[in-house]
Amino acid sequence: MTRDEAKNKIIFALDVDNLKNIDCWAEKLSSKVGMFKVGKELFTSAGPAAVEAVKKHGGEVFLDLKYHDIPNTVAQAMLAAGRLGVKLANLHALGGPEMMEKASQAVRKEFSDCERPRLLAVTILTSSTQETLKAVGIEQPVEQMVVRLAKLAKESGMDGVVASPLEIQAIRAACGSDFLIVTPGVRPSFAAVDDQKRIMTPAEAVQAGADYLVIGRPIAKAADPVKAAELIVDEIVAGGQ
Ligand SMILES: O=c1ccn([C@@H]2O[C@H](COP(=O)(O)O)[C@@H](O)[C@H]2O)c(=O)[nH]1
C-alpha cells in the first residue's frame, strides 16, 4: 500500500468545541489524513458552520451524528445532512429496518448516486463490551450481534457500517467486499486506550480489511500531532509489506 492510500484511509475525529480549532487542525492535518469527522460535540457547539469550515480547507466530512429516532425524523435529518454536502453520514442500526429503509429511500430519491452521502449504520459502539450488552438486556455475543446488525443494515439499504476492527472479517464474510466498513477503536502502539474497549492497531485494522479508520485522541493528544499522523501512516504501510 502506498503512503497516499494509507493516508486516505484515516478519518481524523475533530472532537473540539469551536470553529477556530477546526482551522487549526485542518491546517495541520489536511495533507496527513483523508477526511475529517464532525461529531456530536462539534456539531452541537458550532452547527453546520463546522462542516463548511472543513470544506473551506478542501476537506471531506464524515458527519457522525448517529441518528436514532422515529423513521420520519431520521429520514429528514439524513436529507439535511445530504444538503450539507457531507461524504459519509450515519445512524444507529438498533433503530431498526424501517428507520434505515426510510433514510436510504429519502436520500436516494433526492440526490443522484454520485452526489449522495454514503450512509453508515453504527452496529455496537467500540466502547461497549459483552457486559454492556448484558446490562441492556442483549444476551448474544458481541460479534454475532454486530454481524446481525450489519446484515440488517445491508438489507435496509445502508452502504456500510461502523464497527470495531475486531469484527471486520466476520462482517466481510456476511456482507461482501463492496460493503463499507469504518472502524473507530483504533489504537497505535504509542497511544493510550482511553475509553475504547474493542480495539486493534491501525496496521491490523487495515490488514483485516477496513475501508476507513476513525482516529481522534491518538493524534489530537500526541505531543506532536503531525508526527503522530505520519507514524500511523508509516505503521499502515509497513504492515502491508
Ligand atoms: O463505535 C464508535 C462509534 C463512533 N466513535 C467515534 O469515533 C471517535 C473515536 O475517537 P478516539 O479519540 O480515537 O477514541 C470519537 O469521535 C467517537 O465518537 C467511536 O469511538 N466508536
Image (cartoon, rainbow, N blue to C red):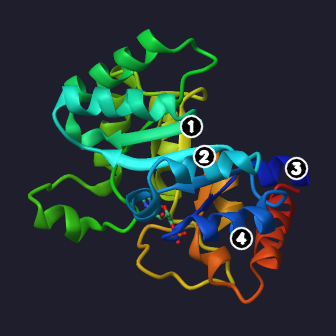
Between 42 and 169, the residue placed more toward the observer is 42
Location of residue 160 with respect to 227 vertically, above or below: above
- Which mark lies nearer to you, 3 or 2? 2
In whole angstroms, how far apart are the C-alphas of marks 1 and 2?
Answer: 10 Å
Asked whether residue 1 appears in the rendered view, the answer is: no
What's the residue type where badge 3 is placed? Asp
In the image, the residue with mark 1 has its CB under 8 Å from the nearest atom of ligand 1: no
| The disc label shown at residue 52, or none | 2
Q: Is residue 40 above or below residue 196?
A: above
**Which amino acid type is shown beneath numbered disc 4?**
Cys
Which mark is first along the chain, 4 or 3?
3
User: What is the number of the mark on residue 158?
Assistant: none
Nearer-N-terminus badge (1/2): 2
Residue 120 as seen in the image, left or right of residue 156: right
Residue pictured at 86% horizontal, 64% vertical: 238
Residue drawn at 71 percent across, 70 percent down: 24
Q: Position of residue 119 (x, y in %)?
A: 46, 32
Asked if the residue under mark 2 is in contact with the one under mark 4, i.e. CB atoms within 8 Å, the reply is no
Local SS, label 4:
helix
Q: Residue furthest bottom?
A: 223
Disc number for residue 24? 4
Question: On the picture, is 199 further left or further right than 208?
Answer: left
Secondary element type, mark 2:
helix
Give the labeled residue for mark 1: 86
In the picture of the structure, the residue carrying the numbered disc 3 is: 4
Amino acid at the residue labelled 1: Val
Q: Residues within 10 Å of mark 1 (few under 14, many from 20)?
A: many
Where is the C terminus found, in terms of image quarters? bottom right
Amino acid type indicated by mark 2: Glu
Q: Quadrant of residue 154?
A: top left
Q: Is mark 4 within 8 Å of ligand 1?
A: no
